[in-house]
Amino acid sequence: MAANNGAIKLVAGNSNPKLAEAIASYLATPLAQAVVRRFADMEVFVEIQENVRGTDVFVVQSTSYPANDHLMELLIIIDALRRSSARRITAVVPYFGYARQDRKPGPRTPISAKLVANLITRAGADRVMTLDLHAGQIQGFFDIPTDNLFASPVMVRDIKERYKLDNVMVVSPDVGGVVRARGLAKRINAPLAIIDKRRERAGESEVMNVIGEVTGRACILVDDIVDSGGTLVNAAEALLKQGATSVTAYITHGVLSGGAVARVTASKLKELVITDSIQPTEAVRVARNIRVLSIATLIGEAIGRTAAEESVSSLFD
């Protein structure tokens, strides 16, 4: 009888089945047969319907809305695989939903990103693979190997296909995102500008100051998460007032909660480009100025290299 050592299995939760299917297609490996459903009281039930003993299993599940449901699915899938004697379990979490709670912003507040890291580890994951963490130091919250992938190669390829790079200015929408924006700017050899936003008094709207000369430039805003869309819309208006010819935003994770899609659609943004780390809603799919890039090839290649014990970091050299 042949051993399963070296065999790859892909298991998908319910958060982003289309991305999981695209990753499976890239790897030419069908998704494992599994049931992930709810009981009448909404408890999560998981059953792996094929043999995974001795296999290298990758669980594809973003902790996007509804975050708690999808997190519980991930934990229970991992537990089911551990009890099924999988050789190694890798949690592939394209969008790590609690990443914005990575520190104590005030007294008596949690560090929820660390709690979620503990839960994933204790559930039985041997490794974590994620994409564009809100803060890179979250990797240190895990006591297991953690690969933080970057969407920048996918974005750079798209930018090079659509823009004359001698007229492009990369812009960070706030001071905290400078490192991320600088990394993309270096890849396309473009200058960097920064939006300095501040609220002078309580109850007054934020003042957007542009650090850098953007006159006559096609500006590209770069960030990891777009949630309400308010900062992006305000930043676009500030850049256009300073003489930018157009403003496009390249954002990895399109959370787009509440009225964000309508806000972006009505704004002066030429285009909002997001990845499918979070499954796009129907509103996103039909929006006139929102476009989705697939990260299936990037994640699929990282999974393949991890399974073969090859370098993942060289993907971003």
Image (cartoon, rainbow, N blue to C red):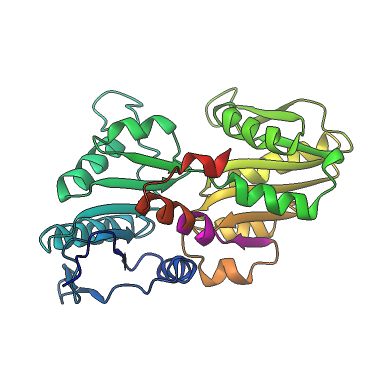
Asked if residue 299 lies left or right of residue 161, the reply is: left
Residue drawn 72% across the image and 43% down it? 220
Could one spot residue 173 in this view of the protein? no
Q: Residue furthest left?
A: 83
Asked if residue 213 lies left or right of residue 198, the reply is: right
Q: Residue furthest front?
A: 1
Could one spot residue 280 in this view of the protein? yes
Residue drawn 26% across the image and 77% down it? 33
Position in image of residue 169 (x %, y %): 77, 36
Quarter of the image containing the C terminus?
A: top right
Asked if residue 156 lies left or right of residue 224, the reply is: right
293 part of magenta stretch: yes
Task: State the extent of the magenta-drawn residues as a range.
Answer: 290-300
Quarter of the image containing the N terminus?
A: bottom left
Q: Is 5 in front, or is 56?
A: 5
Is residue 234 placed above or below 269 in the rendered structure? above
Residue drawn 25% across the image and 33% down it? 110
Position in image of residue 216 (x %, y %): 89, 38
Q: Quadrant of residue 4?
A: bottom left
Is residue 283 placed above or below 220 in the rendered structure? below
Position in image of residue 108 (x %, y %): 23, 27
Q: Quadrant of residue 221?
A: top right
Q: Is 30 in front, or is 152?
A: 30
Residue drawn 65% across the image and 62% down it? 291
Position in image of residue 84 (x %, y %): 12, 64
308 part of magenta stretch: no
Q: Quadrant of residue 208?
A: top right
Is residue 245 placed above or below 208 in the rendered structure? below
Q: Is 246 in front, or is 189?
A: 189
Asked if residue 271 lies left or right of residue 84, the reply is: right
Is residue 222 placed above or below 77 in the rendered structure? above
